Amino acid sequence: MAAGLPEDRLDGKVCLITGATGGIGQETAKALARRGATLVLSGRDEARTAATVAAVREAAPGAQVEPLLADLSSLQSVRDLAKAFRDRHSRLDVLINNAGLIIDRRQVTVDGYEATFATNHLSHFLLTHLLRDLLVASGPARILNVSSEGHRLAYSHFLDDPQTEKRRYDGIRVYGNAKLSNILFSRGLTKRLAGTQVTANALHPGAVRTGFGHNSEGFFKHLIKLAGPFMLSPEKGARTSIYLASSPEVAGVSGEYFIKCRKAKPSSAARDEALAERLWQVSEELTGVKA
């Protein structure tokens, strides 16, 4: 149990967590499993995903936990993940879009998209779209988008160049673009889910000591390693995700940004409704869906 959080029960609830093979995702899974939820954990690596399932079962004996493999840098893999989930489950009560990527050099995905934006935002935009009807039918249901205070470092007018093809690539700023997108996506979802019993919120977990950034090289990777002793443990970093997934205090709360289990005020860009709408349109174009 994460210290200070009540054990609000989730018996009969089905939760899907992306990026669940370590850090915040794994600690969130353990806590929700202890509360009685059925856990579906998405990971890219088969061995690491299996190890995570075993760790969750050890932390919550008798818990219902299953793995689903997916590489969220591939839109086809995201589609396969949604199909695999639907083949196994007829409901979805909590969707936690937790997977994240930060790199210091521009890379492109199999779809030809800049990897940070594709993995942190486009994959979750598409996955949420493909599972949206299950969430609505299962209501009250919750969508959590794990963002970051790093969203304040986003480039101005980042949607003029969402693939970072025209400006100098700065891994931190590009990560900021993606994390800003997570918050704007939550606002767009809230607007479109009005009248349903599905909520969508974004959160900052804190600076957490995990394997995050291991895909980076050189000075950037070294800097993350040096900062490790000053960061939160994954268990503490997971507290806000656990709170938003399970607490009755936030039932019906939607379109908000949370830090340390409390509402917080994101950047002015993150509160820009026109920017949220433009991001939605760009995301539809890039994923090939009408969400």
Image (cartoon, helix red, strand yellow):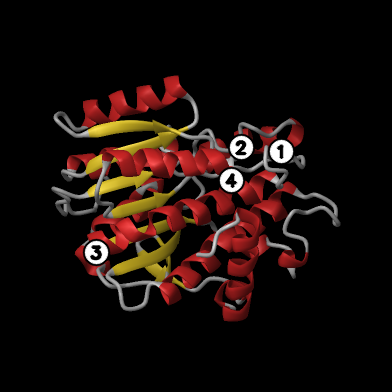
- Give the residue at mark 3: 139
Q: Tell which tag, 4 or 2, sits nearer the viewer.
A: 4
Q: Marks 2 and 4: in contact by CB < 8 Å? A: no
Q: Tag 2 or tag 3, which sits nearer the N-term?
A: 3
Q: CA distance from mark 1 to mark 4?
A: 19 Å
| Badge 4 amino acid | Thr
Q: CA distance from mark 4 to mark 3?
A: 27 Å
Q: Tell which tag, 4 or 3, sits nearer the viewer.
A: 3
- Give the residue at mark 4: 119
In which quadrant of the rendered view does residue 46 lie? top left
Q: Tag 3 or tag 1, which sits nearer the N-term?
A: 3
Q: Tell which tag, 3 or 2, sits nearer the viewer.
A: 3
Q: Tell which tag, 1 or 3, sits nearer the viewer.
A: 3
Residue 276 in percent (x, y) is at 58, 73
Tell me if residue 91 can be seen: yes
Q: Tag 2 or tag 4, which sits nearer the N-term?
A: 4
Residue under the point 73% across and 41% down? 108
- Give the residue at mark 2: 213
